[in-house]
Image: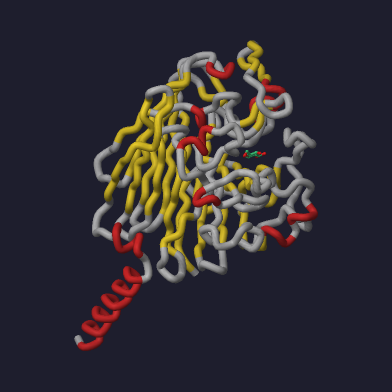
Amino acid sequence: MKKQVLLWLLSGVLFLNACQNNTIHNETASMTFTISEKPFGQINGDTITQYTITNPQGMQVSIINYGGTVTNLLVPGRDHELGDVVLGFDSLSGYLQKANPYFGCLVGRYGNRIAKGKFILDGQAYQLTLNDHGNTLHGGVQGLDKVIWQASKPAGDSSLKLTYTSKDGDQGFPGNLVIEVVYTLSSDNALQIAYSATTDKATPVNLTNHCYFNLSAGKQNTILDHEVMLQAEKFTAVDSLLIPTGQLPDVKGTPMDFTTPKKIGAELAAVKGGYDHNWVLKRKGKDLEKIATAYDASSGRFMEVFTTEPGLQFYTGNFLDGTLKGKQQQKYQQHAGFCMETQHFPDAPNQPSFPNTIVKPGESYRSLTYYRFSVK
Ligand code: BGC
């Protein structure tokens, strides 16, 4: 009995201590989930709204309905202090600038590259808009990252549902594609992203999210000291424009080997341009599985990635160059953040041996990814 009282007192002291150490935590700590909203600027007379979900632990995610973009993700570190672990901007104008490198947004209709923006489906040739050295990247010139999504709040205050209908012919893709993305915070500090879509004509679909993580929450200028594990023994080899050659080389004995945790910077210099590749995930089946982790020893933050997808684009912010002014005037230098984009493989519509990305009428595209945070 005495022991129980002591434990109870101790947990109270720890809780109070955690609250004192952290003003944000103090303001938001509640025993339930909450969701709030506030205006985040305007696009041609349409108000963009920022929604903030808070879980009972105080973890918070903020999402705007422009691009379905995660603008902030506040996660506790070892010292219980909440830190924002994603790169981004303080205002809508930041996200609207041409140089925005897909910070935090939803990506589609086809995440990653399609060679020359061409594919043939059911005997018909399609040409997509080109936006990356003669290829199509992340769905084309105006992908799902650059549209206004319809937001609604399902019951429970832990989720935000975003819907968008991409019309037949949008960016050159066939079919009216009705897309739904549900962002949910769980009580065990995971951000869950559930994607679904239906179409009225066969069409390639590959949806993902493009958060740039820095688990130190800005305390480290780069992510080179983060330790990463990728559950993958192969990757999709690419040419100089990052288009798959069709080969799936083994990672063993190469800088691409992250089968056991390794600092991102350990062998990055040996990879021309830095890491920007799709790893072929080693999976047991098609269900949700843990396939990657990242750890920042300085803050203690540990991220685990779970997905139903067969691939993961691990991108180390190679094209960041210090010219973008991010949140609180931070200058995001090269490797300031990394992305773990769960996905099907790049250019699958032109690579018959890659897992299928074609969704047909009557079928339902479904994909689920969790980013779960804890401390070590
Ligand atoms: C791609 C990079 C690209 C970046 C855009 C990543 O998903 O793999 O090549 O530069 O997105 O910021």
Front-lying residue, 287 or 164: 164
For ligand 1, the image quadrant comes to top right
The residue located at (32%, 40%) in the rendering is: 38
Instruction: Please say whether residue 280 is visible from this viewpoint.
Output: no
Q: Position of residue 94 (x, y in %)?
A: 52, 38
**Image quadrant occupied by the N terminus:** bottom left
Answer above or below: position of 220 versus 60. below
Residue lying farthest front? 329
Answer above or below: position of 99 versus 172. below
Instruction: Please say whether residue 152 is visible from this viewpoint.
Output: yes
Q: Position of residue 37 (x, y in %)?
A: 31, 41
Q: Position of residue 251 (x, y in %)?
A: 73, 52
The residue located at (30%, 72%) in the rendering is: 15
Answer above or below: position of 54 versus 130. below
Residue 320 appears left or right of 158 = right
Residue lying farthest top? 124
Residue 130 appears left or right of 295 = right
Residue lying farthest left? 1
The total number of labels drawn is 0
Residue lying farthest bottom? 2
Q: Position of residue 179 (x, y in %)?
A: 43, 27
Front-lying residue, 357 or 11: 11
The residue located at (51%, 40%) in the rendering is: 209
- Colouring mode (rainbow / by chain / secondary structure / one colour): secondary structure
Residue 94 appears left or right of 348 = left
The residue located at (25%, 58%) in the rendering is: 30
